[in-house]
Image (cartoon, helix red, strand yellow):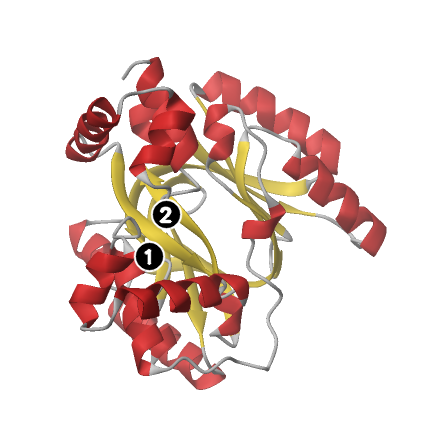
Amino acid sequence: MDKKDFKILKEICENARVPLTKLAKKTNISRENLFYRLKKLERNEIIKGYQARLNIARFSHSGYFLLIKCQKTNEKIDEIIKNLKFVTWASKLSGEWDYLINFYVKSFSQLNKFLSYLFNRLKNIQDYSLLIMLKEYKDDFRPYFNEKGNKKTLIEEFSQNKIKIDYVNKKILKILNQNARLNSVEIANKINKREEVVRYRIKKLEKEGIIIGYRAIIDSSKLNYNIFYILGSRKNITDEEDKKIEEKILNNNSITYACRCIGKYDLIIEIFARTVEEFYKKFQELCNEIKLIETSSNILLNVYKHNHLPDHLLQ
């Protein structure tokens, strides 16, 4: 990759539906060269796809992180994790924990169903920790390119007032989740509707805060970054301290994701670094800044699933 490729990734990482003509102007690259470069980035799996980012709190009852430690990992366990339903994120780690799973449910019965299925399949679990999501502080790929995150792209707090999505909007959302770069004409052809109808519905979904953005799924390892997860506890986080933590995280250009939780850990933070030494330096600085205690650090080995819209949320 060269500087032009980084320019493209910087512009498209959190704006995946930007038209080619507009992207060409922003990057100062000809439309033809831009098209070629995008296809090459996709072919080399630097860009692994394009997804609409939804405000999942509007569809679900609650969100969770599940940390799992096995007596011993193997390919069979990996396959079980890869094929889990209800999951937006599933990954394999190295460190205190072996797997990190993020999932959302529409009821406590779904939560029970998911956990029962998983624990019945995984016979050699040594330890696990279930964290309830309270609020996201940050979820943004722009720090990869030395840009600050944007609070407008975060999932809202969960509430009991869920939205109703009609059949046409469900089809549109599913298509945008599979390929957010398809234009309204292409989507209209797929669902047998007029282009202006599709365009109006997408704008309305954006205005209502159901669609909160469009992301290019970027393989951070192809940017020569290692991803680390910091799990930490804090005592008695007041509203004032919560705001301070949020501000520090938003202004930290090494953090791509951070969430406040209830459970064994109060915070889960995703941080990137080129080397382990660089990570530990950032880790110590962050622990001192936001006064983390009882921390656990884990390195990301594999991402098995990254899906902003699991099917069950639209049922």
Name the residue at 27% across, 72% down.
Answer: 171
Which residue in the rendered view is the most extreme toward the bottom?
Answer: 109
Picture quadrant of residue 245: top right
Disc 1 or disc 2, which is closer to the eye?
1
Q: Which mark is residue 98?
A: 2
Which residue in the rendered view is the most extreme toward the top?
Answer: 2
Vertical placement of 153 versus 130: above or below? above
Amino acid, disc 2? Asp
Name the residue at 37% across, 42% down.
Answer: 18
Vertical placement of 29 versus 271: above or below? above
Helix, strand or loop under label 2? loop
Q: Position of residue 93 (x, y in %)?
A: 37, 42
Name the residue at 55% across, 28% down.
Answer: 147
Helix, strand or loop under label 1? loop
Name the residue at 20% across, 26% down.
Answer: 32
C-alpha separation, residue under disc 1 versus residue under disc 2: 20 Å
- Residue 171 or 83: which is nearer the viewer? 171
- Residue 66 or 203: which is nearer the viewer? 203
The quadrant of the picture occupied by the N terminus is top left
Q: Which residue is mark 1?
A: 307
